[in-house]
Amino acid sequence: MAKRKSLKEDPCPVARCIDVVGDRWALLIIRDAFEGLRRFGEFQKSLGVAKNILSTRLRDLLHAGIMEIMPASDGSAYQEYVLTPKGRELFIVVLSLRQWGEGHLYQHGERCATLVDRKSGKTISRIELRTSDGELIALEDAVFKK
């Protein structure tokens, strides 16, 4: 398999992000970390991914500063993979992908897990883009300035 070209110097921010988290396993590891998984075995069991692939993806996420290794929270000899503040900021990205998937990849009436506020139990509203003064904005209303 040919090594993929690095996009870390690309002028596009989307390309640079894809270079770091564009692999499906990386995003699923991050998703699982948001759900509280922390140990190698937990990730492997949840994802069903080969150990060598999981090891590589975790190493890449560590190198990118998205996760860090911490001593086990239960005091055992294990180590845990924990999201850094940089990794936690990917919550909005994963949530956006989730909401897009809910809207486009499920049949009418097909159930999926619902994201709710931990304290109130209320459903999380869909993400919306708004201008700085609060007006809803669509793709047609936005332009990238270079």
Image (cartoon, grey):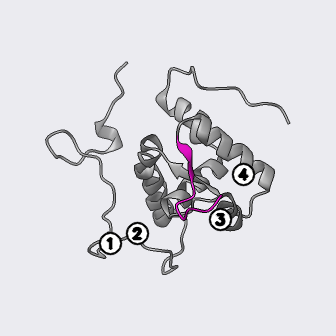
Q: Earlier in the sequence, mark 2 or mark 4?
A: 4
* Magenta run includes residue 69: yes
Q: Secondary structure at mark 4?
A: helix
**Residue assigned mark 3:** 42
At label 4, the amino acid type is: Leu
**Residue 44, horizontal then vertical, whole percent:** 71, 61
Q: Secondary structure at mark 3?
A: helix
Q: Give the label, 1 or 3, closer to the camera.
A: 3
Q: Amino acid at mark 3?
A: Glu
Nearer-the-camera pick, 116 or 41: 41
Please state which of residues 143 and 16 is positioned toward the viewer in this rendering: 16
Q: Which mark is residue 54?
A: 4
Position of residue 34 in the picture relative to residue 57 (left or right) = left
Q: Which residues are magenta?
A: 66-77
> 22 above or below 127?
above
Residue contact at pointers 1 and 2, CB within 8 angstroms: yes
In terms of secondary structure, where does tag 2 sit?
Answer: loop
**Residue at 75%, 59% in the rendered image:** 49
Q: Label for residue 115?
A: 2
Q: Disc 1 designates what residue?
A: 123
- Name the N-terminal-most of marks 4 and 1: 4
Instruction: Identify the residue shown where x is 74% and y is 31%.
Output: 4
- Amino acid type, mark 1: Thr
